[in-house]
Image (cartoon, rainbow, N blue to C red):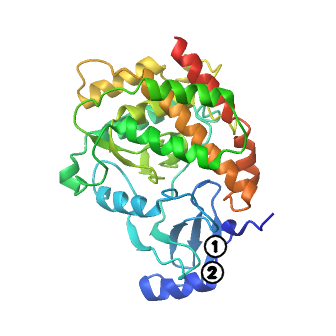
Amino acid sequence: MPSHVSAKLDIDRLSLALNRKLPSCKGPWKVKKTDHGQSNPTFIVSSATDQIVVRCKPFGQLLKSAHMIEREYQIMSALHGTKVPVPKMHYLCEDAEEIGTPYFVMEYIDGKAYLDPSLPKMSADDRTLLYDQMNQGLAALHSIKLKSVGLENYGRPGNYFSRQLSIWGRQYELSQTEKISEIDQLYDWLKGNLPDDVGSPSLVHGDWRIDNLLFSRNKPYLISVLDWEISTTGDGRADLANQIMQWAMPTGTEGRGLEGINRKAYGIPSDQEYIEKYAERVGLSKLPDLKFPLAFCFFRMAAILQGVKKRALDGNASNPLMALKVGKIIPQYARKALMSLEN
């Protein structure tokens, strides 16, 4: 198996690039890889006086249209200064020869990331605040007027779920390592039940969930939204359904869900309460229908994790051990989706 080169960063080549492109930040530099970023390796790069973040594509052979750090850079550049908090972008380098892979450099945000949505070490009051902050941030994103931030041409025209299902169906097939009958059954249902577009397109993050958000260390206020790789324009229900989907999964580092949690005791809103608050904030006259979006989000996450697993087996995963762990629960996402369709 090839060496896990995606977990390494050539600091000498990076230092030369930073000296040319970001001369206000001074080395010598130390590099620490974050635990996040299964898709695109992310590094905290520090010196005695400065701290920045480098996010890059994995090394090795990649699926076409995957690992789109260019899109991340574009949308975060556009959103900086809006009600959706994002880091300041410093520069993007699309030349793989510079450090060995395309990458971008952004501001370091000193915040707290959470992997477990049950937030076991947090008080019930702080959990309530954090979940409301997630809800408020999502509503703010979907309320952004595309033209006002120069993103009116950011996504492709046409039915959002149709084009997304085409993309993720193809990605799943290209990274498939074994046959999973539940995935095939879910995919067939999705292809046969595509909904019409609903209203004007909004910005869609694509993977809105707790572990892609940063919160203040003192009080759980949302201070940064990260991981915009699969962002586009389209149906905002996909982002809302993505959170509901994740909460249906088992607790723990792999499932990262809320299954079996007494949400009321924990200060965590029910799905219905969360959806109602979101609908109120974005000005919807009725609650959104999430049947198809929810099933689609289960499928998309299965496809994402299948790609992560395939990269681990190929030797170029960002975190190989975790990649193989999460790969084992891919069938659970399909089973959860099929269960949701029976309700």
Do the CB atoms of the residues marked 1 and 2 lie less than 8 Å apart? Answer: yes
Label of residue 11 in the image = 2
- Quarter of the figure with the N terminus: bottom right
Picture coordinates of residue 249 (x, y %)?
A: 62, 28
Residue 52 against residue 159 in the figure, above or below: below
Count residues near mark 2 (Cα–Cα under 10 Å), then give few for <14, some for 14-19, many for 20+. Answer: some
What kind of element bears circle 2?
A: helix
Which residue is depicted at the point 31% across and 25% down?
279
Picture coordinates of residue 164 (x, y %)?
A: 42, 41
* Residue at the limit of the structure toward the left, as seen here: 148
Picture coordinates of residue 119 (x, y %)?
A: 60, 34
Q: Amino acid at mark 1?
A: Val
Depth order, front residue of 20/46 = 20
Residue 283 against residue 97 in the figure, above or below: above
Picture coordinates of residue 295 (x, y %)?
A: 50, 26
Of mark 1 and mark 2, the one earlier in the sequence is: 2
